[in-house]
Image (cartoon, rainbow, N blue to C red):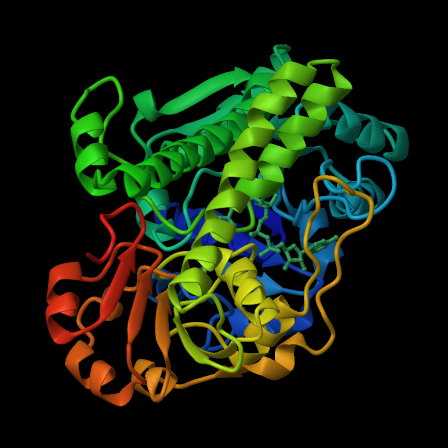
Amino acid sequence: MVNICCIGAGYVGGPTMAVIALKCPSVKVVVVDIAVSRINAWNSDQLPIYEPGLDEVVKQCRGKNLFFSTDVEKHVREADIVFVSVNTPTKTRGLGAGKAADLTYWESAARMIADVAVSDKIVVEKSTVPVKTAEAIEKILTHNSKGIKFQILSNPEFLAEGTAIQDLFNPDRVLIGGRETPGGQKAVQELKNVYAQWVPEDRILTTNLWSAELSKLAANAFLAQRISSVNAMSALCEATGANVSQVAHAVGKDTRIGPKFLNASVGFGGSCFQKDILNLVYICECNGLHEVANYWKQVIKINDYQKSRFVNRVVSSMFNTVSGKKVAVLGFAFKKDTGDTRETPAIDVCKGLVGDKALLSIFDPQVTEEQVMRDLAMRKFDWDHPAHLQPMSPTATKEVSVCWDAYEATKDAHAVCILTEWEEFKSLDYKKIFDGMRKPAFVFDGRNVVDVDKLREIGFIVYSIGKPLDP
Ligand code: NAD
């Protein structure tokens, strides 16, 4: 029986390993983490993350060939293959602050593996890391081990939160990068054998280490760039009377472009897109490629512009002030079907509205009050002063309340801002919401989920990203 251990029981480690356990009944999979509460949650009925279909997968395997533990060293020692899926956030201090990836967690995991290993191991980079990280990891492992052989593989994860289980069951591709040596290729084959249990052979791509590492950064940069492209177009649509949904449909019909990922919105979020582009920018700068770095920076700048454009639209539409006005915010997660709020555009939009003294009442079906308050107290990245992250006003969270449902959030509000595309926001009783609101009642749809004509018929003044404005 192959023994797999995964260090890091987060949004990637948990679902990925649960699916490997399900699809490979003869493989023992242990997911370890230093966060005791997270492991306790994985061992309970209330999993630490919300992801459609995840509960069922975990229930089927947990206690059979899938285990969650805080005994990190024991399970790493026993494993043949060690996945490392720890967080790799943006550095906040020192060299490269605000751009470079912080590999502190990765380095400490690597040192621990070297310390505890008593047999040869394959170490798999599951986290998203800068290109050439494997070289650094190899150095740390080989200089610290006692004659034990390690093979490092890069196997970046392409799942998207909200569809993680579907993506893992049926991936567009699995990418495995390894050294072009006999040992490296043997390790690649061993990992391939695991995925081959359910992934068709032609979808398992093998490359050299650096291509695999860079492909993950490139994929996220391309995806984010696509969102910034359609969002840039949405601003032009609003200025000219074109409709961004019609433009995106027409553009996407070109088979060279394709229809997916062309929804205009208030901006992209999530823990990865911004972080990985910043990382790419930093790597380009370190290699003297400043024009290339500037190109990718622009993707983030457009994203920031889109969020501030939205805030400005809200304030200017409401007679140039939201001071003391209740504004309902529907949706706080960075996308539907997840409770993840990392880097959600809602943070910047809410901060912008509070900056203009709005009173916010926030509802999201999967986000807790604790998350909202923590996120709104967080600091903001500033391009011009990357080493000095901008602090949030200490009083800001006093103007924010979190509600149990959309009707409570919108009661007596002057405006509704839709910031996450939850399906349930499409079928709300907007007549009831309208009746409970102050007049004129505004809807600012940052995700193009509402039926604009229907809401205008009810009496709302409606702004929807990239759509012709209320006449
Ligand atoms: P996460 O923060 O949810 O999980 C990381 C976990 O690692 C945490 O629970 C933390 O406690 C644990 N950890 C850190 N150091 C540890 C150590 N030394 N020993 C044991 N546990 C340790 O992060 P995530 O969203 O799962 O992302 C993990 C990596 O995968 C990141 O590099 C990310 O960029 C990448 N990634 C994320 C996604 C996504 O959608 N979230 C998708 C693809 C790739």
Q: Is residue 36 placed above or below 207 in the rendered structure?
A: below
Which residue does the image show at 68% across and 20% down from the upper left?
284
Residue 130: % across, % down = 67, 29
| Residue 279 shown left or right of residue 234 in the figure | right
Asked if residue 369 can be seen in this view, the reply is yes
Which residue does the image show at 71% across and 65% down from the upper left?
392
| Residue 176 shown left or right of residue 227 in the figure | right
Q: Is residue 246 placed above or below 152 in the rendered structure?
A: below
Which residue does the image show at 24% across and 58% down from the upper left?
449
- Residue 60, located in which quarter of the rendered image? bottom left
Residue 200: % across, % down = 29, 28
Q: Which quarter of the figure is the C terminus placed in?
A: bottom left
Pick the residue in front: 285 or 340.
Answer: 285
Farthest residue, direction front: 319
Q: Is residue 52 placed above or below 29 in the rendered structure?
A: below
Pick the residue in front: 470 or 111.
Answer: 470
Pick the residue in front: 139 or 245.
Answer: 245
Residue 192: % across, % down = 45, 28
Residue 371: % across, % down = 57, 72
| Residue 400 shown left or right of residue 113 in the figure | left
